[in-house]
Image (cartoon, rainbow, N blue to C red):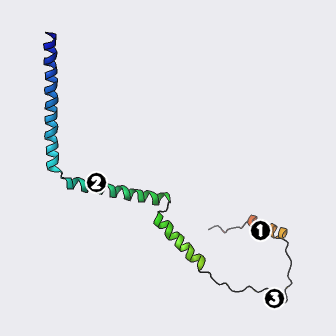
Amino acid sequence: MERLVHDLEFSQVEMQVLDGLKSGNEALKKIHDVLSVDEVERILEETREGVDKQREIDELLSGALTEEDEEAVEVELDQLIQSTVTLPEVPREEPEGEESEEVTPSQDKSLVRERRTEKVALEAA
């Protein structure tokens, strides 16, 4: 008797599983009617493009250069290095009437420090 009850309960569970499969198949058919394979491929491609665009925006915001940008910067740097600007010659002689005062390296450093610490008063508006 227990075996018969168990078999009946198992049959009911099997019926519920089959009903679930049937409902699932009907839902899939409805989805397939709405979406074609081409539609799904289009959606996936749009998603990939969106992700790529977001990565590019993230890189721009983070200050990272793409490989193309980095190569362009390298080429521009090489061009700048190769195109040397010729500066005019600096006179080596002292102008007449002025006496040159030799500045030692230690004096030169102290002059630089003085200029850095020199305070400038600004007129208030």
- The residue at which mark 3 appears reads as 95
The C terminus, quarter of image:
bottom right
- The residue at which mark 2 appears reads as 44
Residue type for callout 3: Pro
Q: Residue at x 47, y 64 (%)?
A: 67
Label 3 crowd (10 A; few <14 / some 14-19 / many >=20): few
CB within 8 Å, label 3 to label 2: no
Q: Is residue 90 left or right of residue 27?
A: right
Residue type for callout 2: Leu
Disc 2 from disc 1: Cα separation: 64 Å
Q: Is residue 119 left or right of residue 49?
A: right
Assign a secondary structure to mark 1: helix
In which image quadrant can residue 47 be found?
A: bottom left
- The residue at which mark 1 appears reads as 112
Label 1 crowd (10 A; few <14 / some 14-19 / many >=20): few
Which residue reaches farthest bottom?
A: 96
Assign a secondary structure to mark 3: loop
Count numbered badges in the picture. Answer: 3
